[in-house]
Amino acid sequence: MTTETKTTKTRGQEFAADVAALLRARNPLLWIVTREEARAESLLFEAAKSAGYNFLTWDCGQGVAEFNNKVLRDVGSIAIDETLKVIGSATRDRTAWVLRDAPTWFRDPMVSRQTRNLARSLPTFKRDNAQAMIVLSPSGEVPPELAGHATVIELPLPDRAEIGAILDAAISALPEFGNDEAGKPDPSKPIRSVAAPNGIRDAAIDAAVGLSGEEAANCYARSIVTSRKVDPKLVAGEKKRVIARERVLEWFDPLPGGLDAVGGLENLKTWLSARSTAYSPAARAYGLPAPKGAVLVGVPGCGKSLFAKATATAWGVPLLRLDLGALKGKYVGESEGNIRKAFKVIEAIGRCVVWIDEIEKALAGSAPGAAADGGVSADALGSILSWMQERQGEAFVIATANNVEVLPPELLRKGRFDEIFFVDLPTFQERKAIAKATLRGVGKGETVDLDVVATVSETFTGAEIAALVPDAMFVAFADGARDVTTEDLTKAAKSVVPLAEQAKAKIDALREWARTKARRASAPEVVEAARPQLRAVDID
């Protein structure tokens, strides 16, 4: 038995139960917010049946029809005003009317008035003749004239159990075996059993969480048609289109190499590795809560942003960048609306890494005494705090900051983030790892003495060490396109004025803060005594 089958009710079933209760309570107008018309109608049909209602649909293309799309020519018409008259005739048995295209017609004052009159009169009908109007719309914006009568319900995206059922349906549609040369089923060519074995099935469900039912079904069908199996990577690729459509988040492609491309930060990597196990089916069955995320505070250029990108690669999940500054709008309420929309998309996407870069700059206006911005930053902070505390999804948030002094303490407390890490200047071993990873990335410097490079770059940030490689490559290319040498790198290092010297006071203050308020991202330095004694030839 999979973990999905243990859930008492799916999101869809809970939605249907809510609608059934509203129908029993004689609510005259339900406004269902969804893009999934077919899935919504299937759930509404079950809700109507549970509440003892008949079920009819109306649209401007075919008029009135039953759930099986059998058109009823003698009931209503393709004109909505005629159908509304039938609804208000008080002569039909209990019926739930699903109005597919009604929002467009509500712009007509006559139709709007007619609907409003119905909403007032329907609760007075005899119970045996009760009628209810159910409007399907992709938007939750109800016309002001009807706002006082409508009950707005948002159809939730399918959860893991529903996605699992969609996957099973796609696999069940396949033949059990492939055919031999004579066109007969060949038991040696199984199809269903290899389309999504246990490990792949869980990954395929995880990849589709956040898609609509139709999107998930289409992805599974496309994957099966192209490769005769379910490919989680192909399914996850559909999420990129979802992000592009909403335009409130930025999608980043995976960082080649993952955590191996990040030199050092061993304590942080170990902590992250332990958190990755929380997403397994066994962890869900155990009741292990999903990790919330981490704040990376430290010296600029020491790998905080790179680590966020590498985390998504290591976990095989999408990386979404939440730029709070870009979400600010020029109209009152627009910024808050964009932030809420971004959080809604994140929750819909399911398992992912959300990267908030330099969060202190986006929230600079929220601190008391800060430059006034009309309360936008304070409202953004409030939205972030509420979401971080109450969210139920599997998004892992990595927030980076260079100046921790301006961050509000309520953002950093336990319950919103799991841990705060301090990313200091790289240690000797980390400087070696950074130089090695950078050289490996460009395919150069196989004979470089990494000990020497790490020694001459003692106060460098990770970004400054990585920048030595292209500087050395320019010199090597001009000298006959030869390989990069240790001498090329040491000469490049001599021309650098490290950030640690330019901003020594700020870095010292940051280290003092981190001494008691954050965990170190790097393992303690243990190789100081092993550093080589450089000769003049090494650096001249």
Image (tube, rainbow, N blue to C red):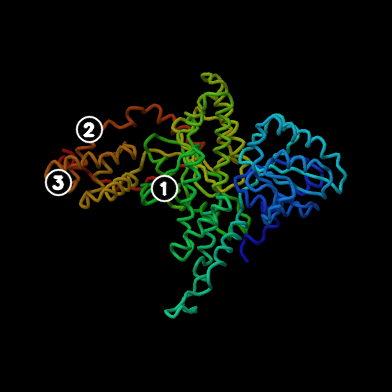
Residue, disc 3: 481
- Depth check, mark 2 against mark 1: the one in front is 1
Split into 4 quadrants, where in the image is the C terminus? top left
> Which of 498/511 is in front?
498
Residue highlighted by disc 2: 495
- Classify residue 457 by image quadrant: top left
User: In screen coordinates, is 228 left or right of 15?
Assistant: left
* Quadrant housing residue 78: top right
Residue 254 in view, yes or no: yes
**Is 123 displayed left or right of 256 in the figure?**
right
Distance from Cα at disc 1 to Cα at disc 3: 31 Å
- Quick one: 85 or 394, which is closer to the camera? 85
Residue type of the residue flagged with mark 3: Ala
Most distant residue in the front direction:
74
Res. 522 visible in picture: no
Question: Which-is-in-front pick, marks 3 and 2?
Answer: 3
Residue 305 in picture, x, y percent from top left = 41, 40
Residue 111 x/y as whole percent: 71, 34
Q: Is residue 103 left or right of residue 447?
A: right
Amino acid on which the number 1 mark rests in the picture: Ala
Residue 238 image offset from top left, x and y in percent = 48, 50
Q: Residue at left 51%, top 28%?
A: 328
Q: How far apart in space, not on screen, are marks 2 and 1 (Cα)?
A: 30 Å
